[in-house]
Amino acid sequence: MAMLKEQDHGTPSRVSEETVSLTIDGQPVSVPKGSSVMHAASLMGTAIPKLCATDSLEPFGSCRLCLVEIEGRRGTPASCTTLVEPGMKVTTQNDRLAKLRKGVMELYISDHPLDCLTCSANGDCELQDMAGAVGLREVRYGYDGQNHLGQAKDLSNPYFQFDPSKCIVCSRCVRACEEVQGTFALTIGERGFGSHVSPGMDESFLSSECVSCGACVQACPTATLIDKSVVEHGQPDRSVVTTCAYCGVGCAFKAELKGNEIVRMMPYKDGKANHGHSCVKGRFAWGYATHKDRMLKPMIRKSIREPWKEVSWEEAIGYAAAEFKRIQADHGRGAVGGLTSSRCTNEEAYLVQKLVRAAFGNNNVDTCARVCHSPTGYGLKTAFGTSAGTQDFDSVMDSDVIFVIGANPTDGHPVFGSRMKRRLREGARLIVADPRRIDLVKSPHIKADYHLQLRPGTNVALVNALAYTVIEEGLANMRFIEERCDPVDFAVWLEFIQRDENRPEAVAERIGVKADDIRAAARLYATGGRAAIYYGLGVTEHSQGSTMVMGMANLAMLTGNIGRRGVGINPLRGQNNVQGSCDMGSFPHELPGYRHISDEVTRRLFEAAWQVELDGEPGFRIPNMLDAAVEGGFKGLYVQGEDIAQSDPNTQHVTAALENMECVVVQDLFLNETANYAHVFLPGSSFLEKDGTFTNAERRISRVRQAIPPMAGYADWEVTMMLSNALGYPMHYDHPSQIMAEIAALTPTFKGVSFERLEELGSIQWPCNDEHPTGTPIMHESMFVRGKGSFVVTEYIPTDEKVGPRFPLLLTTGRILSHYNVGAQTRRTANTAWHPEDLLEIHAHDAEERGIREGDWVAIQSRAGETSLRAKISDRVQPGVVYTTFHHPLTGANVITTENSDWATNCPEYKVTAVQVRLTNTVSHWQEDYQAFREVARQVGPEEIAAE
Amino acid sequence: MPANRTFDEAAIKAIIADMRSLDGPLMPILHAINDRLGYVDQRALPLIAQELNLSRAEVHGVFTFYHDFRKAPAGRHVIKVCVAEACQSMGSDRLVDHLRAAFGIGLGETTPDGRITVEPIYCLGNCALSPSAMMDGKLYGRVEGTRADRLVRSANLAAAGDGR
């Protein structure tokens, strides 16, 4: 694809029932009421010169270039700030306007370096374009007056630079930071000639409040704010529209390239999930894709104590297949299994589960959703009938009350976090339930009405107390319940919820939140208008994760907050395609489309299509596989793009299991931690190297398009295909579109999905079928998928993980903006500038008791293990609670977490671990041993062996 | 100006607490700090930002926009010399030179003993009597020759009266 230039209409599109008709340069045009004259002109193809206007920002009217004449009006109003009116007659070009514009441009250029030829924005500079558009030929003022040239550049941000001498002070960067990102990190300092862009209080970009989302760089019309990669490589010459491979927001990006070299990733305005916005990860942290650590050769070894030996693809695939077959012959069909990847495409996840079911002949397939949102799948399916969120992201713009539970959108899902903040600035009310004070609780222009700072592990008690309050205070939406919900289930639940144990006053102390606040939050949620719940792993990763999901569903049904815009229950899913990998049948009990493997009709359908007999018994979940491996009955695992040795709880149990296996096949971009225990390494391909689709947290299926050829020769789906063929189960696809065709043919919710349709619509939210041919933004509008909504009794059962004299603190874990999951990608980018290591957040009170000061090394110990990291004294956590992230392998945060898990889905209880923290001056034994083992396990054999 | 100023955090916090409930409290708070403490210490800005739920950048932007909000304490007496177009054309440069000769300081400077500050101002609305100046809020017109001497004398007199 050639370079894609998106049209900039200058001011945002307006939506209105009413249209206004006017004449521009003698041509009649009709546009929605509220549109600017500039926008109207642009729609009919007339580009009025502009500098301070861009359609991602509200009009500002400062550059004075977009002046027009309007019949019957004095002067020359700015077309960006002038709204269309019926019958208006606008002239955009005549001698007077040309002279005015030229005069304005002369002033700009009199204080601008004349280095266009060597300027990094050469070829992509609006100032240059405007000089051309107005026909600037001379600058009568000369260039010798006082000016801003020769000022020092700010190079502090690793990804972009700021050159104040090229700045025209149009404020686009300042406004983008405020309106689009909502961080307010930039301002214009001083006034008049002294006016200048100031990050924070005239700080460097890196030390200011800037979160490096790139909105300012994107908005800059000159070379003032520009990607360092463009400075280095020059302008890209082709672009490929694709989908980001980081979080579950699923932003659309243009990968901009020169040949096969990525120059930059630019957010795509037409992307329905991000509307042209981005975060530091998707926008800038793509360098991992071509990092020198990428393993590009297949490798094998007999034992994990041996160095790796580079071999041909044929040999690696052949060895893996032979080993799997040998293991099945020796230990039975069920002794092997596979894990699908939430980072790979739908088509790839589908193929891996197909390989397990058809080639291995068992159902031992699972995915990382096991450790994140499996309770969402279970809980929402039980209550509503589908395993997915109910809304599209845009729905939040219609919410009056936003209830965030156990999620940290501004760090974990930053682009959606920005949208949510925009709605909050418009006046929506906010309730946050989180043990930690996340940025949403209080940050510039954002303040939660209620921060329910609960003790980790008491979610269900809280949600029950909220529901109790709604019932007791007569705030329930009885009409909704009667019309939409199952009356028997409701009657049973009603009896349960009215028990005294659910009264806020009875549980306030246990939860750690005042009863009055619980009641006030319940009132706000029930009566504040359209109320939406957004939640994350702080809900699911508990022993009662599934219970909590159903508890929230109860609360939403109780108040009628489901089935419309602005309401709903919305999981913020962690990985780019975790929704998709679940949809694709990555569970031991479910075929694609969440249909139970024991359901004979569905099984017959797949058996006919796949030409193989399927096992009707559910297979092993990840924890079952690991337990069986430790016991000796499970011997082989095919892992595509997942790092269980770092991401899964109780690391020492995981690694003991992996060590006990005879054939672990890791398919990944890097030698990840799991690869330390692998016998076969198959090089993976990044999202830039293949075609396919990702499905984001709002069920939106978006295209992933190949921008460069696979660096190791094959895309991941091709590798799975080769392995399956070697195992004796033939798979033949020429392109992922054929895999999607098979998925659509076998899965009712995907019936209308195809690559052609995706080209046409841009993206599609499932269900997409005959009833909903263009997809379904809002679910359960007239009735629940299961028919009547089901209230489920959600009794609070405290976790077994309790504090005591040995382990007096509760550890909870989370994420940080600059890193993603196990950090395999982001640790290989300059994002480490913001977060070079995992830190333990501890309250001053607990720190002082233990003699811990800021930056001290501390040992953290649970009944599962011990590790060491540095302390950060913070009032974000409450006394008695400590917090850390798990982005760095040698911190080993999951050495501490335990095997406790959700009763329904085995989702690990990452969010609650009883620990002790003490000062130390050394790394833990685990860290020492693991570091030593890691060095040996990652060795690749000498070249001559590889050449054999 | 005193090199080692102490930062009166408590006083600033009290001012913020007092005014934060106002509609649009940022300007009144900056005024109050400037008036009561004589200047707005840079360290006050993050405190204001924190309390008003603004970013540091926003507070900085407002603070630096207005010249009358001081970054450092002024001298005890402030002479503002108009350097806008009318006064420039009528010789405000000469007045600036005159004051430099008298006090040893230029525009935007304060005498080492902290008595006098001279600073520029852009129009006092007294163009008919250019060049103009203002000392401690009192307007002076046609400040040339002997009238400039008189301004210097008044300043010295006022400074001499300090502390009595």
Image (spheres, coloured by chain):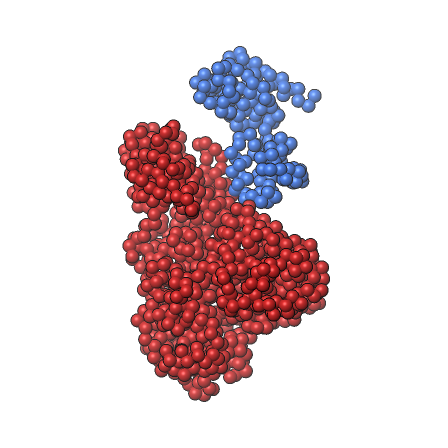
Chain colours: A red, B blue
Residue A846 screen position, x and y as percent = 67, 58
Depth check: give the residue in front, A900 or A25: A25
Looking at the image, residue A829 sits to the left or right of residue A436; the answer is left
Residue A603 screen position, x and y as percent = 43, 79
Residue A284 screen position, x and y as percent = 42, 54
Identity of the residue drawn at 51% across and 84% down: A633
| Residue A310, visible in the rendered structure | no
Q: Examine the image and state in which quarter residue A328 appears.
A: bottom left
The mark total stands at 0
Quarter of the figure with the N terminus of chain A: bottom left
Depth check: give the residue in front, A249 or B57: A249
- Please tell me whether residue B121 is drawn above or below residue A310 in the rendered image: above
Quarter of the figure with the C terminus of chain A: bottom left
Identity of the residue drawn at 43% across and 38% down: A60
Q: Examine the image and state in which quarter residue A404 appears.
A: bottom right
Looking at the image, residue A735 sits to the left or right of residue A361; the answer is left
Identity of the residue drawn at 40% across and 76% down: A354
- Please tell me whether residue A333 is drawn above or below residue A870 in the rendered image: below
- Please tell me whether residue B83 is drawn above or below residue A229 in the rendered image: above
Identity of the residue drawn at 55% across and 66% down: A789
- Please tell me whether residue B16 is drawn above or below residue A258 in the rendered image: above
> Residue pushed farthest bottom?
A330
| Residue B56, visible in the rendered structure | yes
Residue A10 screen position, x and y as percent = 38, 43
Depth check: give the residue in front, A924 or A485: A485
